[in-house]
Image (cartoon, rainbow, N blue to C red):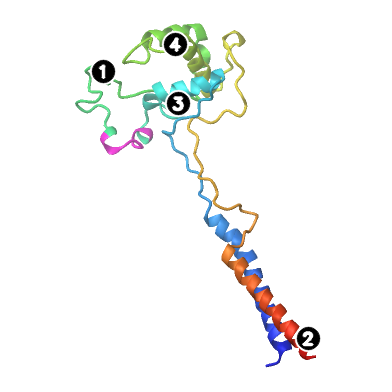
Amino acid sequence: MNAKTILTAILSAVFLIGLTSVCLSPVQAQSATSTATYDPFAEPPLPKRPTQLELGRHTFWHHCMPCHGDAGQGFTDEFRLQWEPDHQNCWARGCHSGRYADDSFPIPTVVPPLAGVGLLARYPPDSLFEYLRATHPPQDPGLLTDDEYRALIAFLYDLDDAPLPAENVTATPTPSAAPLASPTPTPSLLPLNEPIPSFGLWLFLVSILILTLLLFARRTRRG
């Protein structure tokens, strides 16, 4: 086998290896990227200077979500069964069976939805504010600050697609506010559209190139 044939074979191998690397890199990057999944119990973000809606969303998650659902759908069986098995029967003895305790309080077997049924549009915010402050959270009514109660009302109106009267708005909600329970995506290990060959592959290609140049120089000297 002469030098020309060897040179042609080496260059062909380098081309095929490079082509394979380019074709496989997006697939490898895709497999390294995790798909975000929705977690109904995930804590929504609370910025250092939250808007009224962001504060209301976080207040709802912390004080209201366990009974009223992650999206205000009510205490449905579907929502209840997403809890850990030992937390799914909320009316069992020692949980919410009817006796008050420091961390327990009786709850009804039916908690109606708050979202999408137009209920809140029939109640003036001031009346709702007085009601919530006098009755919620059930284990410690009046626990929240006035700003938290009003932020909660703003969030409840938003859930119900009902316009909140302007005089009750203390801050303009940001359009980029996150949903009630935002999924947390895992960062991509590799970008999807930018194939990055491994260091070992680059080292192999450089070695092939050097060998090719040496063979070519040797052939030139003989000629």
In this view, which residue lies farthest toward the bottom? 1
Residue 76 picture quarter: top left
Give the alpha-carbon distance from disc 4 to disc 3, as whole Å.
Answer: 21 Å
Among the 4 quarters of the image, the one containing residue 83: top left
User: Label 4 sits on what residue type?
Assistant: Thr
Mark 4 closeness class: few <14, some 14–19, many ≥20 residues within 10 Å: few
Earlier residue among tags 1 and 4: 1
Q: Disc 4 or 2, which lies upstream in sequence?
A: 4
Q: Which residue is mark 4?
A: 145
Residue at mark 2: 220
Q: Is residue 43 left or right of residue 192?
A: left
Q: Which residue is mark 1?
A: 102
Judged from the image, the secondary structure of the residue bearing numbered disc 2 is: helix
Across and down, in percent, residue 155 comes to: 51, 20
Relative image position of residue 50 (x, y in whole percent): 55, 21
Outermost left residue: 93
Q: CA distance from mark 1 to mark 2?
A: 91 Å
Q: Are marks 4 and 3 in contact (CB under 8 Å)?
A: no
> Residue placed at 38% from the left, 33% from the top?
79
* Neighbour tally class for label 3: few under 14, some 14-19, many 20 plus, Cα within 10 Å: many
In what quadrant of the picture does the N terminus appear?
A: bottom right
Q: Nearer the viewer, mark 4 or mark 3?
A: 4
* Nearer-N-terminus badge (3/1): 3
Look at label 2 and name its amino acid: Thr
Percent of width and height locating residue 124 = 52, 8
SS state under label 1? loop
Residue drawn at (59%, 17%), measured in percent from left and top? 163
Tell me the residue that label 3 is attached to: 72
- Of circles 1 and 2, the one toward us is 2
**Cα distance between the residues tagged 3 and 1:** 25 Å
